[in-house]
Image (cartoon, rainbow, N blue to C red):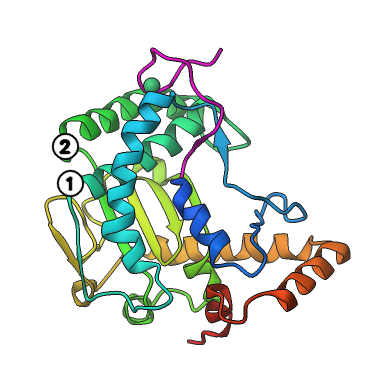
Amino acid sequence: MELCKYCKEKEAIKNSHIIPSFVYEWIKVTSPTGYMRTTDEPNIRKQDGLKSALLCLDCERIFSKLEDVFKKEYFSKVANYRKSCPDVLDISVDTIKCIYIMAWRALAYALYFPKENEYTDVEISRFPVLLDEIKNAIETGGFTNFRTHAIPCTKEVLTTLNLPKVPWHMYERSVTAEPRVWDNWERFVLYIQIPFSIIVFEIVPNTDDPWVGTQLENVDKIVLNDIESVPDYVGALVNHFYKAFVDSNDEISDVQRKKMTEDIEKADPNCGSFKTMKKSW
Ligand SMILES: [Zn+2]
């Protein structure tokens, strides 16, 4: 049996998510097909996001309460096709904790279920200490070791930040969570894209980077008009994931493409996904 990687006491369930499951639910409900596709296996229609034997049921239950707060307080206000994003978003300690949980899960996933990656053995050997520090922050609410940034993906915010004008589905309908190291550990961030938001968790905080108006620790709200700048690597990552999308889109077979077209023809013309498709810069 696999032990829970968080409490290290109970048996892990097989279907722990990295990104909360309500995010995948939202994508399915607002999509014309009711399915999702991933860039690594574009020809398979999926019902759910990436899962692994990471946590036990008890830890999942504790985390799901925090995820509910994040959903109510942040996600459903930002990812909303009927109402536009409010100018001010309240941020509570539980919302910050929920993001720390995503960071913990993504880093733990990279450590315990390694796939092809570019981490060196020395880098990997530092992961356990970092995971313990993130866990400590989740348990105590002491957010001094890390920095988290939220970028609500409205047209105004993305334009102010000069982020790439890629098709809107990249900002409004894609999901990514990837730890990335650069510059010999000057920068080690977890880049998270969820619908209508980019979240960057600085695992190794870099105080020279020009973040303005985005940081969540020690604030009780985010004011969209105060978001003025983010480091250049954010735009580079948007372009990187867009290229991965384009490459994987090229691999979709004719049979699957036909299925997609048929599904789209049958779909409710008011579904959210179509609003994203029609949106222009
Ligand atoms: Zn556990």
Relative to residue 147, is residue 1 depicted above or below? above
Residue in the foreground of this view, choosing between 114 and 4: 4
Distance from mark 1 CB to nearest ligand 1 atom below 8 Å: no
* Mark 1 residue type: Val
Q: Residues within 10 Å of mark 1 (few under 14, many from 20)?
A: some
Give the residue number, with chain letter if any, for mark 2.
141
Within the magenta stretch, is there residue 231? no
Residue 203 place in picture, x, y as percent: 32, 41
**CA separation, marks 2 and 1?**
7 Å
Residue in the foreground of this view, choosing between 75 and 204: 75
* For the residues bearing labels 2 and 1, Cβ distance under 8 angstroms: yes
Relative to residue 115, is residue 21 depicted above or below? below
Q: Residues in magenta? A: 1-19
Within the magenta stretch, is there residue 8? yes
Instruction: Tell me which secondary structure the magenta stretch mostly adopts.
Output: loop
* Mark 2 residue type: Gly
Horizontal side of residue 117 vs 179, given as left or right? right
On the rendering, which quadrant does ligand 1 occupy? top left
Residue 242 place in picture, x, y as percent: 58, 66
Give the residue number, with chain letter if any, for mark 1.
93
Local SS, label 1: helix
Residue located 22% across and 45% down the image: 94
Q: Mark 2 or 1 closer to N-term?
A: 1
Residue located 38% across and 12% down the image: 9
